[in-house]
Image (cartoon, rainbow, N blue to C red):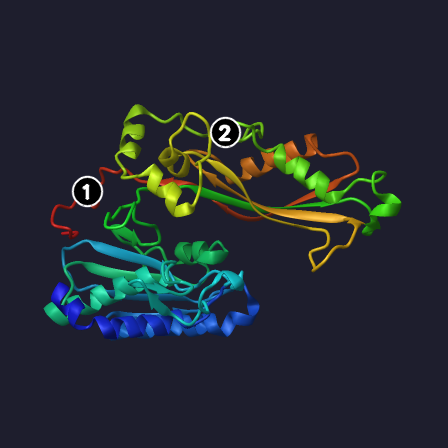
Amino acid sequence: MKEAVALHKDQFIEELKQYLSIPSISSLSKHKEDVKEAADWTASALKKAGMENVEVIPTEGHPIVYADWLHAAGKPTVLVYGHYDVQPEDPLDLWETPPFEPVIRDGKIFARGATDDKGQLYIHIKAVDLLMKEMGELPVNVKFVIEGEEEIASPNLGPFIQENEEKLACDAVVISDTSFSEKGQPAICTSLRGALAMEMTVSTANSDLHSGTYGGGVPNSIHALVQLLDSLHEENGRIAVDGFYEGVPEPTEALRKEVAEVPFNEERTKQELELDELFGEEGFTFQERVGIRPTLEINGITGGFQGEGLKTIVPKEASAKISCRLVGEQDPKKVFEAIQRHVADNRPVGAKVDLHQYIKADPVAIDSKNPYIHSKSGRCV
């Protein structure tokens, strides 16, 4: 297999570049046709790889691509999940090269979607392709379910699964949308934190006001927003929202030992990120903070005058995008309600606050001792 990969490496890279060149941004309506093109490209690649029953299935949003090969009698069925949609390319000024014009630098391919998730997905497709060419068959039954809405919280995947339970039945699901622990150290992810994303908008007066005339005498929406955002955390990194930690399990010594066994070099991480210090919830290691503990992060802030130069105003409106990562039995609905209560209890004088929820997803975990994870042969047999 390695020899075949080496032999066809240049061809595979060129095909991947074609895939990465499609701006399949699911969140922007102007790219709807590009998303459809990526779905069609995915379906075509699956057909060329020898998969059968290949379909591009319409949904109320972007299409889902399905394919299968079910001729391994008595063997398990593995479902490969992935997504062909990508995040928006903003901010463009931080890209060294155009995001949809793939280039190779230092042995790495740079383009939007190269590692989330077209690159990994393409590897699965080519693995099937090479196995079929080398053996004429696959060692297990295989199904592919590839969606185009992962970056917008998969609104149509759930209904699709519910309507096609028999069609999608399998013994194991393979998802390659996570990362290696470090270079040269492959990892199998056994849990994913849940998600909750929202936007907080703070408004005050009915218009921006001149700071020379009104400054110091009226509420400032940015001041109020910053005050609210600061109230969400304690100085030690713990989240200050009452009820936020409901459902968060106390980590067992066995779990902490398992987390500690994941390779991690703190000094190298700080150097790579150009940070003097790491930061997070007191009493937990970096690996625990990013793996088994919940978070509340401020993703972006907007408010007031953003143009060149200066405009001395008291802004009428400011907003922040916020996301949470959830663990254990945390319920996204209850967490959102807890944040709503916190905002109501800490609302600054003269400020009107609106919270709009965008995304919610439950945490998920599987037993790290699952036999499919521990297959000695490297194959599900």
Mark 2 element type? loop
Spot occupied by residue 93 in the image (x, y as percentages of width and height): 53, 63
Residue 245's disc number: 2
Q: In what element is the residue under mark 1? A: loop
Q: Count of labels shown?
A: 2
As drawn, the label of residue 342 is none
Instruction: Give the distance between the C-alpha atoms of the residues marked 2 and 1, in whole angstroms.
Output: 32 Å
Q: Which residue is mark 1?
A: 371
Of residues 134 and 225, the one nearer the viewer is 225
Residue displayed at 17% across by 58% down: 140
Whichever of labels 2 and 1 marks the residue nearer the N terminus, that label is 2
Tell me the amino acid under the disc marked 1: Pro
Q: Amino acid at mark 2?
A: Tyr
Residue 366 found in image quarter: top left
Residue nearer the viewer, 8 or 24: 8
Rendering quarter of residue 202:
top right
Q: Point out the image quarter for the N terminus.
A: bottom left
Horizontal and vertical percent position of residue 308:
69, 60
Instruction: Check contact, mark 2 vs mark 1: CB within 8 A.
Output: no
Residue 329 appears left or right of 314: left
Going 44% across and 36% down the picture, which residue do you hit? 277
Q: Residues within 10 Å of mark 1 (few under 14, many from 20)?
A: few
